[in-house]
Amino acid sequence: MKVKVGEQAPDFTLPASNGENVKLSDFQGKNVILYFYPKDMTPGCTTEACDFRDRVLDFEGLDTVIIGVSPDPVEKHAKFIEKYQLPFLLLADEETKVAQLYDVWKLKKNFGKEYMGIERSTFVINKEGILVKEWRKVRVKDHVENALNFIKEME
């Protein structure tokens, strides 16, 4: 099953950086930026996380929460959050079940080597839990600004 824009976003529960298990449905009544990224502490993922961090108050002002998801364990997320003062939850999808649910677990190539990994992607889920926008194969530059502008247009 592939998620589709205009449909109910599939609910899930994952361990979070705050030490709790977090459900997507916990955020019903708020807009959600659900972003999938390959790995904590890598250059592109750090830039993306810091870009979201730097605009978090703008998103919060639009009743929007930011949630990052990667296959990294909660302990690694905690170090990432501490090092870069990230003010939002990171979820540990170690078994990649949610990544597969959102169809972002893909065959990738790097320097001629093939491997499975996260395709950097962002989803906007509205206050009713409907998937209203997706960006796949995200380029980090200007992405957070584009996401913020989309949320502003929704209001």
Image (tube, rainbow, N blue to C red):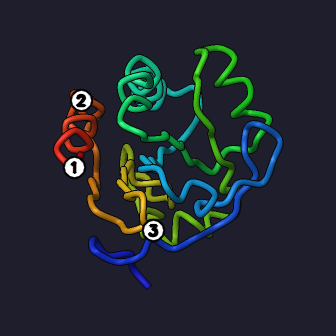
Along the polypeptide, which appears first: circle 1 or circle 2? 2
Question: Circle 2 is placed at which residue position?
Answer: 145
Dot 2 surroundings within 10 Å: few (below 14), some, or many (20 or more)?
few
Q: Amino acid at mark 1?
A: Met
Locate residue 128: give its quadrant.
Answer: bottom left
Locate residue 81: give its quadrant.
Answer: top right
Question: Circle 3 is placed at which residue position?
Answer: 102
Q: Amino acid at mark 3?
A: Tyr
Task: Measure the alpha-carbon separation of dots 3 and 2.
Answer: 22 Å
Helix, strand or loop at mark 3:
loop
Helix, strand or loop at mark 1:
helix
Along the polypeptide, which appears first: circle 1 or circle 3? 3
Q: Residue 10 location, x and y as percent?
A: 51, 74
> Toward the viewer: 23 or 51?
23
Dot 3 surroundings within 10 Å: few (below 14), some, or many (20 or more)?
some
Q: Quadrant of the C terminus?
A: top left
Q: Residue furthest bottom?
A: 1
> Toward the viewer: 139 or 15?
15
Q: Which residue is found at the position 71% from the left and 54% from the top? A: 22
Task: Measure the alpha-carbon separation of dots 1 and 2.
Answer: 14 Å
